[in-house]
Image (spheres, grey):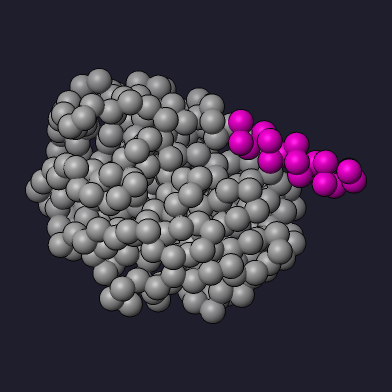
Amino acid sequence: MTPKKNAFVVGLAAVLVLGTTLAADWPLFRGNPLQTGVADTTLSQPLKLRWKIHLPGDVEGTAAVSGDTVYVGSYDEHLHALDLANGKEKWKFKAAGPIKAHPSVAGDRVYVGDSEGVFHCLDAATGQEKWKYQTKGEITAGANFTGGAVLFGSADETLYCLTKDGQEKWTFKIAGGPVLGTPAVVGDRTFVAGCDSTLHVLDTAKGTELGAVELEHPVGATVALDGTKLYVGTMTKQMLGIDWKEKKVLWEFESEQQKEFYASAALTDKLVVAASRDRRVYAIDRETGKKAWSFLTRGAVDSSPVVLKDRVYVASTDRNLYVLELATGKELEKHDLGAQVLASPAVAGMSLVIGTVKGDLFCFE
């Protein structure tokens, strides 16, 4: 094995271990560095409400859960740190503008961007700001981590890589549109796509492009990774299966009503679970790209589904949180949250946390 290949394998193994280690928490938008949307905890069947609180502003971003703390941003321009057990406030931090982005936790720090384009690094225990970095566009996606550095995208068409001290390490420009997806990381690779209809494969150390896959469609969702395979939805009507190492699209799946995939997919060993603005949740065979099942809600689904063992948890703009059977798509539970939901579930610590556009934050156990 060549040194370069050996480094990639070692890096890949490290990320897989990290993803497994962090599965008990939910520190990133989709739960782990690979952005797979798969949880590793226990939830009651049926779900039972532990607590509900109201925040002064809309909640569109997905919460992060680390240990006994929930971190969630709001349109009230604050990042809130709450006790997972009872929802009581531990601290709140005033940002430069409304927070639509998903917070991300690494070690003793929490990171989040705001609508004014400011990326904040805070002490996770106290909310004290360690540093901040100004971009030229609003930040709506979450961050990911690589080799001690932090990665995040901005509406200024740029993917940023900053050091742990908040210094710019490198930037990568995507012509023609904002970077809306949270970057996924595997080994020494990260991936970014946008309105240029291209998936870019980047070296995480230098930010240099190592390859690209022409998608023919703009992308606003976060990619989900498993080894050399990658799955992502487009702003038109497709969910794509991609071999990023071979730089080719393996299959295209189209939504039944020709609507967009803004939600990010969840991956199991056999299925891609994806949601669309055509009001449906789909399970797609990972190998063939064929539909295994679909479930119809009464509203567009921008909430990204989460898989926990044999169940799928996903919310809709029809105000409901659904629990579906993974094997068949059969509805097992439905919980009315009282308002439209754009956020995705955060599932960790024997809890499911999710917010609504009216500022209500729910914790089920």
Q: Quadrant of the C terminus?
A: top left
Left or right: 190 as drawn, with respect to 264:
right
Q: Position of residue 38 (x, y in %)?
A: 43, 40
Residue 110 inside the magenta-drawn segment: no
Considering the whole magenta stretch, tell me its main secondary structure: helix
Left or right: 280 as drawn, with respect to 3:
left
Quadrant of res 180: bottom left
Q: Nearer the viewer, residue 19 or 112?
A: 19
Quadrant of res 53: top left
Question: Going by the picture, which residue comes out furthest to the right?
Answer: 2
Q: Residue at x 63, y 61 (%)?
A: 243
Q: Position of residue 242 (x, y in %)?
A: 58, 63
Q: Residue at x 33, y 26 (%)?
A: 42
Q: Residue at x 30, y 50 (%)?
A: 328
* Relative height, residue 306 to residue 233 (above, below): above
* Relative height, residue 313 to residue 82 (above, below): below
Q: Nearer the viewer, residue 286 or 164?
A: 286
* Relative height, residue 44 to residue 314 (above, below): above
Q: Position of residue 263 (x, y in %)?
A: 37, 58
Q: Position of residue 89 (x, y in %)?
A: 24, 26
Q: Which residues are magenta?
A: 1-17
